[in-house]
Amino acid sequence: MIRLKSGVGPFVIQQYHDALTEQGIGCVLRNQFISGAAGELPVQDLEPELWLLNVDDARQAEAVWQSLQADSQAVAWVCEGCQEYQDAEFNICWNCQQPR
Ligand SMILES: [Zn+2]
């Protein structure tokens, strides 16, 4: 098992997880449901992480990630300031007010 992706927002990583699952690529999300523990753990331990069950799937998983990024540019975007997922109709981040 290898860590595939971290440092992106929870919505993005969930979307990635769902896309991989649809493709039949085994993966698991970690640190997704422990936000209640915030304040007691270092911040880096609270970032959602996506782990790939089979290292042989890494190349295909990366291809899925790339196509996901290409698709999302048309309909949605991710804030550069806080990495939160944004709906396409908004031009300012709902979370930190950074312009698109
Ligand atoms: Zn933001």
Image: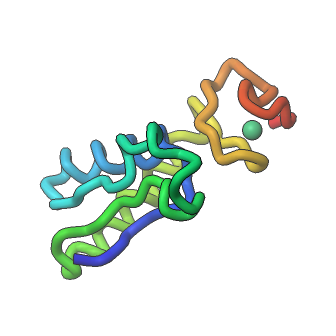
Q: From the image, which quarter does the N terminus lie in?
A: bottom left
* Residue at point 58%, 48% (across, down): 39
The total number of labels drawn is 0
Left or right: where 98 falls relative to 36: right
Please give the name of the residue rendered at 78% of the width and 47% of the height, measured from the top-left corner: 81
The x, y position of residue 38, in whole percent, is 53, 45
Residue 14 lies, with reference to residue 96, above or below; the image says: below
Which is more toward the observer, 19 or 53? Answer: 53
For the C terminus, the image quarter is top right
Residue lying at the far top in this picture: please name it. 89
Q: How is the image coloured?
A: rainbow
Residue 18 located left or right of residue 96 = left
Q: Where does the image place residue 77, in percent across and percent down from the top left?
A: 64, 38
The quarter of the picture showing ligand 1: top right
Please give the name of the residue rendered at 40% of the width and 59% of the height, measured from the top-left corner.
Answer: 49
Q: Position of residue 86 (x, y in %)?
A: 63, 31
